[in-house]
Amino acid sequence: MLFVFIIVGIIPLYLFSYVLLNNYKEKAVGDRFNQMQNQIIMLSNLMLPTGYLTLADVPEIDAEINRVAEFYQGRIVVVNNNLNIVEDTYGLYDENKYLVSKEVIQCFNGNSSKVHDTENNYLILTQPIIHTTEEQKVVVGAIVMNSSTKDIQSTLVSMEQRASIFILAITMFIVIFAIYFSSKLTKPLTKVVSSIDHLTEGYLDEEVSIKGYYEIEKISDSFNKMISRMQKIENTRQEFVSNVSHELKTPITSIKVLAESLLMQEDVPVEVYREFLIDINKEIERENEIINDLLSLVKLNKTAGDMNISSININELLEQILKRLRPLAKKQSIEMVYESFRPVIAEVDEVKLSLAMTNLIENAIKYNVPDGWVRVSLNADHKYFYIKVSDSGIGIPEDVQDLIFERFYRVDKARSRESGGTGLGLAITKNVIQMHRGAIKVYSVEGEGTTFNVRIPLNYIAQS
């Protein structure tokens, strides 16, 4: 983060300074060339009417040429149309000398030439002297003008020095600010890291409270939610282990008590033996039921690779389940109603989905009221199919509706034992639905009834 602050803050500053100085240099050179061109035009206008280019001696023009050359700290050479040197402010050539160069030759073709000699800090402008008449324009000579750029270079060096000082000051400020801000920004994250380390060591009772930026506070809140969820999972795990131990131990204890009662009595009548053995058999069946449900949970906790997916007619599947459960409903005088809005073919694991739906419908029957009803409906759209299981039963208190899918959780423990439930049915149902990438929701009012809504994709979505 410190590196990013420095890169983002300093590199643009250096680029801006470079572009600014480069633009100044280009503009200063361009302006100097324009000034030189104006001076050449002015000198040309003085020369043409006086015949100066025919080697006439005009002191006033000589003086003006020398003044311009001195002002620009350079040199001016005037050439006529015979390439004969008319004037040289350096005095290196006389009237018997000629100046033949590519730039001068181009001038007689009507083209001017600009050269920037960066090595010697000079600008060289070669400009034609054009005599304009009513009929045509004739090049009658050329002026080669040199100008020193030492003043431009001096100004540029001064600007570079000031820019360097400014950049250095800004760089120091950015570095100090970056160190301060990055440390301030990452300090709260250090607390999160420390809390994660404690969490890794098994301490689930610590929460993180970080005040500062909105995003950091959101991280703190999310982390605390994660800790809360992990605490809940840990409590559920411990409760699950405790419940498993209790549930498995209860039938064994009952069997042991019954067996000891028989052993403690002598000459026990056959009827008593039979009664005790019937009770022992019930407890063994209960133990077997609990173990089978636990094994189902273990199997459901495996990967989705254990899913046996095939295209199933959901309408027929629900009809078969209802057919199996109607005797149980009839025994308790429960009316069962099935509504199918359209034929539904879906990719599901038939065995697992049948187990889940059986649990839901069987619960609706078991936890109902005498002469009550159970309604099962099936519907679908282009993406999902929906199963609704409603009953007129005892309902579920609102404060425990989030807990009914936990393993071994029972709303009414006494009634659950009477009905033979193990407390694992809804946990199994939820696992099955989640393995199909579906969802289940419960709506219930205590004393009025319960509705379970199940949504499952028509096409199986494999877990990645």
Image: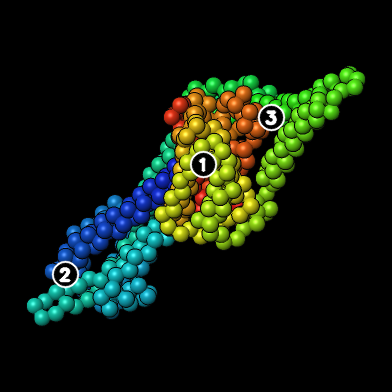
Percent x, y for residue 187? 57, 26
Q: Earlier in the sequence, mark 2 or mark 1?
A: 2
Q: Amino acid at mark 1?
A: Ile
Residue at position x 33%, y 77% in the image: 105
Position of residue 236 in the picture relative to residue 212 (left or right): right
Q: Amino acid at mark 3?
A: Phe
Quadrant of image for the N terminus: top right
Q: Amino acid at mark 2?
A: Leu
Residue at position x 74%, y 33% in the image: 282
Q: CA distance from mark 2 to mark 3?
A: 113 Å
Q: Is residue 283 above or below residue 40?
A: above
Instruction: Report helix, strand or loop for mark 2.
Output: helix
Residue at which label 3 appears: 240
Percent x, y for residue 217? 49, 27
Percent x, y for residue 458? 50, 56
Q: CA distance from mark 1 to mark 3?
A: 22 Å
Front position in the image: 13 or 388:
388
